[in-house]
Image: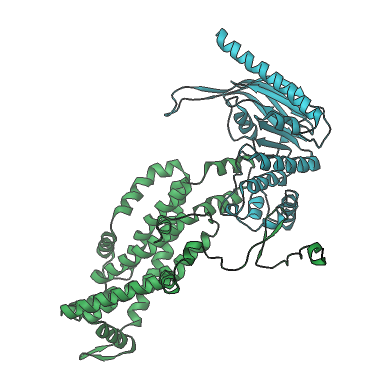
C-alpha cells in the first residue's frame, strides 16, 4: 500500500525547435492518494495526465512542487502500464516479464507465469511480441506491471489504442488482476465510462493541469458498464465534466 | 438426427502441428492441404523450381563460369577454368604443373587465417567497446565520433600501406591492418545501434527501476545485435581485403603473397586461382557463419512484410 502526496506540482516544457513556445502541462496540482484504492485521473487531451504519471514514476522531473510516492517510508516500487505495451521486441513474452525482475530465479519465473495465466497468455510465453496481437501485447504489459509486486500501479490510458471489444476485454482482465492484488492504482484516462467502471475515486484534471474535481465512486465490484447504477454515476461525472468545460470556456472568454 | 451430428469435436492433440493456441485458451483447427500462397501455386513446377534461391544462385554461378570460359576463348590473358582448377589442385596436393614445382597451399593459407583471426579477435571487441561508449556517452561521442567516421572513410588499402610502413615485413603488419579496418566498422554501427534504442523502452526501464545488469544485457546489448552483426560482417569482409593487400605488398608469406608470387611469375592460372580462393573463403564465411548468426538474431522480427520484388512477382 503506497501513499502519493503531490503538492503544488507544476511542469512547464521549454520551447523547442519545432514549437517555439513554453507549454504549461501542469499548473499547480495538489492531491493525495493513500490506501488500496483505484484512482482514475480523468481529463481531456492536454490536461497533463501523462506528464503527471511520468513525474510520479520518476521518468520526468517537475518544474516546481513536490511529489512523494512512498511505501513504509521508502520510495514505492512502481508498476507502469503505458499507452503502448513497450515490450522488448527481441525478447520473448516470458523474458519481457523477467526483464523487470531483479533476479531471474525459478520463483520469478513461476510468478511471471502466474500473472501471464491471469491475463490468459501463459501458452504464448515463448513467443515474441511481434507474434502477438496489440491486445495480447497490452495484456503482457498489464501482467508485467503486477509482476514487480508494485506498491503503486500507474496506468496511462492503457486501452486507448484498442478497439472497443478488445478494450472491454482488457478492462475485465485488469479488474480481475487488481481485485486479486488490490494495489494502490493511479489510472489515467479520458474515457468517463472506463473511469467509472474501474475507479474508487475520480480526480478530474482540466486543461492547464489543475485538479477541478474529486469524485468518490461507491459502487460494488466487479462492475458491469451496463448496470443502471454505473450508468447513473457515469451521467453525473459527465455533467461535472461539462461544467468543467464551461468553466474553462468562461475563464478563457473572461481573459 | 444421428449420433455423429451431436458428437463434440475431438480435443486437439497437444503437439498437433495443425492446431494453434491463440492465447485466449481457444484452439483453432487450421486447414490442412496446400498452404503455399495462391500466387506461388499459379506457377508450373519447373518455373517454381527456378524461383528457389539456391537454383537462382546456381544459375548465377553457371553464368559466371560461362563468361569466364568465353573470355578464355577470345583472350589469351584469361586462363581456362580447367587450367586454373588443375593448377590449384597441384598447388594443394603438390607436384609439377607446366614445368614448375607447386605445393605451397596449406602453409600460406594457415598463416593468413591465423593473422585474420587474431586481427578480428582484437578489432571486433575493441570496436564494440568504442561503439558502446560513443553511443552511450555524449562526451565520448563529441570526442571520438568524427574521428571514427574519418577512419571509416579510409579505404582498406590505406590501412594496409600504413601497417606495412610501420611494421615492415612482419606478421604484425597484416594483423594491425585487420584490427584498424575492423574497429571503425564495428564502432560506428554499434554506436548508431545504441542511439537507435527506443527511448520509450529506456523510460519503461527507468520507471520499473530495472537492474543495471538487465538494462545492459537485455536492452543495450539485445537492442544493438542487428547493428553489431552488420558491423561484424563488414569487419570480416574489409578485414580480409586489408589483410590480403598487406600480404600482397609487404609480406613474404600468406595468401596475398602467394597470389602476388604467381602474378610476378606471369602464371595467370595461379594468380586467378588464389584470387578465387579469397572470394570462396569470404563467401563461405558469410554464408555458413555470419548469415546464420544473423537469421538467428533476427528470429524475433516476424512482422509480415511484402517486398517490392515480391509484390511485382519478381
Asked if residue B306 is positioned above or below residue A197 in the image, the reply reads below
Q: State whether residue A242 appears in this view.
A: yes
The quarter of the image holding the N terminus of chain B is bottom right
Residue drawn 64% across the image and 42% down it: B208
B249 relative to A45 in the view: left or right: left
Q: How is the protein colored in the picture?
A: by chain
Which quadrant holds residue A113? bottom right
Asked if residue A200 is positioned above or below residue B198 in the image, the reply reads above
Which quadrant holds residue B169? bottom left
The percent coordinates of residue B105 (x first, y second) are 32, 82
The percent coordinates of residue A115 (x first, y second) are 74, 49
Q: Colour of chain B?
A: green
Q: In the displayed image of the protein, which residue is found farthest to the right?
A: A220
Residue drawn 21% across the image and 90% down it: B98
**Which residue occupies the foreground of this view, A158 or A81?**
A158
A243 relative to A25 in the view: left or right: right
**Which residue occupies the foreground of this view, A214 or B131?**
A214
The quarter of the image holding the C terminus of chain B is bottom left
**Which residue occupies the foreground of this view, B75 or B87?**
B75
The percent coordinates of residue B209 (x first, y second) are 64, 42
Asked if residue A237 is positioned above or below residue A185 in the image, the reply reads above
Q: In the displayed image of the protein, which residue is found farthest to the top?
A: A254
The percent coordinates of residue B99 (x first, y second) are 20, 91
Residue drawn 62% across the image and 55% down it: A92
Asked if residue A126 is positioned above or below residue A154 in the image, the reply reads below
Q: State whether residue A72 appears in this view.
A: no
Q: Colour of chain A?
A: cyan
A223 relative to B301 in the view: left or right: right
Amino acid at each position: 500500500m503506497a501513499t502519493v502526496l503531490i503538492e503544488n506540482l507544476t511542469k512547464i516544457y521549454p520551447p523547442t525547435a519545432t514549437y517555439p513556445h513554453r507549454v504549461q502541462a501542469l499548473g499547480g496540482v495538489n492531491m493525495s492518494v493513500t490506501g488500496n484504492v483505484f484512482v482514475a485521473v480523468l481529463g481531456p487531451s492536454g490536461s497533463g495526465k501523462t506528464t503527471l504519471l511520468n513525474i510520479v514514476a520518476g521518468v520526468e522531473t517537475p518544474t516546481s512542487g513536490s511529489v512523494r510516492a512512498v511505501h513504509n517510508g521508502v520510495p514505492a516500487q512502481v508498476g507502469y502500464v503505458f499507452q503502448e505495451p513497450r515490450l522488448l521486441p527481441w525478447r520473448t513474452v516470458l523474458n519481457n516479464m523477467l526483464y523487470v525482475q531483479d533476479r531471474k530465479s525459478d520463483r520469478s519465473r513461476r510468478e511471471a507465469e502466474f500473472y501471464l495465466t491471469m491475463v490468459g497468455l501463459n501458452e504464448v510465453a515463448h513467443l515474441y511480441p511481434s507474434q502477438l496481437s496489440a491486445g495480447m501485447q497490452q495484456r503482457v504489459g498489464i501482467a508485467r506491471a503486477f509482476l514487480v509486486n508494485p506498491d503503486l500501479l500507474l496506468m496511462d490510458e492503457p486501452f486507448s489504442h484498442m478497439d472497443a471489444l478488445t478494450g472491454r476485454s482488457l478492462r475485465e482482465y485488469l479488474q480481475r488482476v487488481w481485485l486479486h492484488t488490490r494495489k494502490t492504482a493511479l489510472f489515467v484516462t479520458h474515457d468517463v465510462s472506463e473511469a467509472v467502471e474501474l475507479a474508487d475515486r475520480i480526480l478530474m484534471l482540466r486543461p492547464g493541469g489543475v485538479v477541478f474535481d474529486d469524485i468518490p465512486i461507491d459502487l460494488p465490484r466487479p462492475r458491469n458498464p451496463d448496470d443502471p447504477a454505473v450508468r447513473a454515476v457515469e451521467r453525473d461525472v459527465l455533467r461535472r465534466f461539462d461544467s468543467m468545460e464551461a468553466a474553462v470556456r468562461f475563464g478563457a472568454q473572461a481573459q | 438426427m444421428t449420433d455423429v451430428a451431436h458428437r463434440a469435436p475431438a480435443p486437439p492433440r497437444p503437439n498437433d502441428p495443425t492446431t494453434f493456441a491463440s492465447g485466449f485458451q481457444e484452439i483453432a483447427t487450421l486447414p490442412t492441404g496446400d498452404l503455399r500462397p495462391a500466387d506461388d501455386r499459379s506457377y508450373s513446377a519447373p518455373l517454381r523450381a527456378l524461383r528457389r534461391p539456391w537454383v537462382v544462385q546456381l544459375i548465377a554461378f553457371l553464368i559466371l563460369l560461362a563468361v569466364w570460359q568465353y573470355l578464355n576463348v577470345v583472350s589469351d590473358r584469361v586462363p581456362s577454368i580447367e587450367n586454373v582448377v588443375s593448377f590449384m589442385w597441384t598447388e594443394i596436393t603438390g607436384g609439377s604443373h607446366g614445368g614448375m614445382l607447386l605445393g605451397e597451399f596449406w602453409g600460406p593459407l594457415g598463416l593468413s587465417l591465423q593473422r585474420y583471426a587474431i586481427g578480428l579477435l582484437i578489432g571486433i571487441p575493441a570496436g564494440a567497446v568504442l561503439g558502446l561508449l560513443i553511443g552511450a556517452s555524449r562526451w565520448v561521442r563529441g570526442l571520438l565520433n568524427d574521428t571514427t567516421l574519418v577512419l571509416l572513410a579510409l579505404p582498406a588499402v590505406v590501412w594496409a600501406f600504413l601497417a606495412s610502413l610501420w611494421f615492415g615485413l612482419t606478421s604484425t603488419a597484416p594483423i594491425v591492418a585487420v584490427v584498424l579496418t575492423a574497429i571503425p566498422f564495428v564502432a560506428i554501427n554499434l554506436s548508431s545501434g545504441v542511439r537507435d534504442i527506443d527511448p520509450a523502452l529506456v523510460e519503461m526501464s527507468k520507471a520499473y527501476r530495472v537492474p543495471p545488469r538487465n538494462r545492459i544485457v537485455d536492452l543495450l546489448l539485445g537492442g544493438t545485435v542487428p547493428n553489431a552483426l552488420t558491423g561484424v560482417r563488414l569487419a570480416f569482409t574489409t578485414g580480409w581485403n586489408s589483410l590480403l593487400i598487406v600480404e600482397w605488398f609487404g609480406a613474404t608469406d600468406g595468401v596475398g603473397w602467394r597470389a602476388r608470387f604467381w602474378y610476378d611469375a606471369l602464371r595467370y592460372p595461379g594468380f586467378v586461382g588464389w584470387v578465387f580462393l579469397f572470394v570462396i573463403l569470404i563467401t563461405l564465411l558469410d554464408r555458413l557463419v555470419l548469415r546464420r548468426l544473423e537469421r538467428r538474431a533476427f528470429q524475433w522480427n516476424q512482422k509480415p512484410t511484402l517486398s517490392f520484388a515480391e509484390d511485382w512477382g519478381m
